Image (cartoon, rainbow, N blue to C red):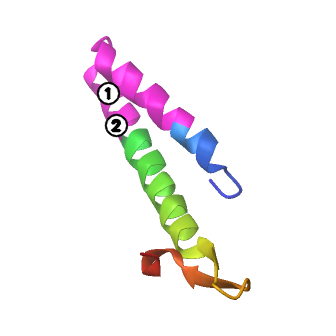
C-alpha cells in the first residue's frame, strides 16, 4: 500500500462494504473481503491521524499578524 492515496483506499473500503452487504459471497470470499476491509480501514485511519497532526489553523491576531496553532488548541 506504499504510495496509495487516502481516497483510493477509502473507495476500496466502500467497495468491500458493498460486497459484504449483498450477502452473495461465500464464506471464504467474505473472509477475504473482510480482511481487505480491515487493511483498508487501518490505512485510512492512519492517514487521517497523520493529517490531523499536520493541520495548523491560521489565526489573525488583533494587530493584523498571523499565528499558527495546532488544530487541537483552537477554541
The x and y percentages for residue 41 are 42, 48
Task: Give above or below for 26 relative to 64.
Answer: above
Identify the main secondary structure in magenta.
Answer: helix
| Closer-to-camera residue (4/29) | 4
**Quadrant showing the C terminus:** bottom left
Task: Tell whether label 2 touches label 1 (CB within 8 Å).
Answer: yes
Look at 62% across and 77% down and name the residue there: 59
Taking 31 as reference, is 10 left or right?
Answer: right
Residue 3 position, x and y percent, is 71, 56
The Cα–Cα distance between marks 1 and 2, rounded to whole angstroms, is 6 Å
Q: Is residue 65 above or below residue 30?
A: below
- Residue 67 vs residue 31, the one in the foreground: 67
Total marks shown come to 2
Is 32 magenta? The answer is yes
Relative side of 14 to 60, left or right: left
The image shows residue 53, relative to residue 2, as above or below, that is: below
Mark 2 Cα-neighbour bin, 10 Å: few <14, some 14–19, many ≥20: some
Residue drawn 39% across the image and 32% down it = 33
Q: Nearer the viewer, residue 47 or 38?
A: 47
Q: Nearer the viewer, residue 13 or 67?
A: 67
Q: Where does label 2 land, which residue?
A: 34
Residue beneath disc 1: 30
Q: In the orientation shown, which residue stands out farthest toward the front?
A: 62
Magenta region, residue range: 11-34
Residue 35 shows up from this direction = yes
Amino acid at each position: 500500500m506504499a504510495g496509495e492515496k487516502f481516497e483510493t483506499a477509502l473507495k476500496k473500503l466502500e467497495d468491500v462494504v458493498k460486497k459484504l452487504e449483498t450477502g452473495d459471497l461465500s464464506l471464504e470470499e467474505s473472509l477475504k473481503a473482510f480482511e481487505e476491509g480491515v487493511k483498508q480501514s487501518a490505512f485510512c485511519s492512519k492517514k487521517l491521524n497523520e493529517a490531523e497532526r499536520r493541520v495548523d489553523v491560521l489565526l489573525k491576531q488583533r494587530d493584523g499578524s498571523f499565528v499558527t496553532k495546532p488544530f487541537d488548541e483552537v477554541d
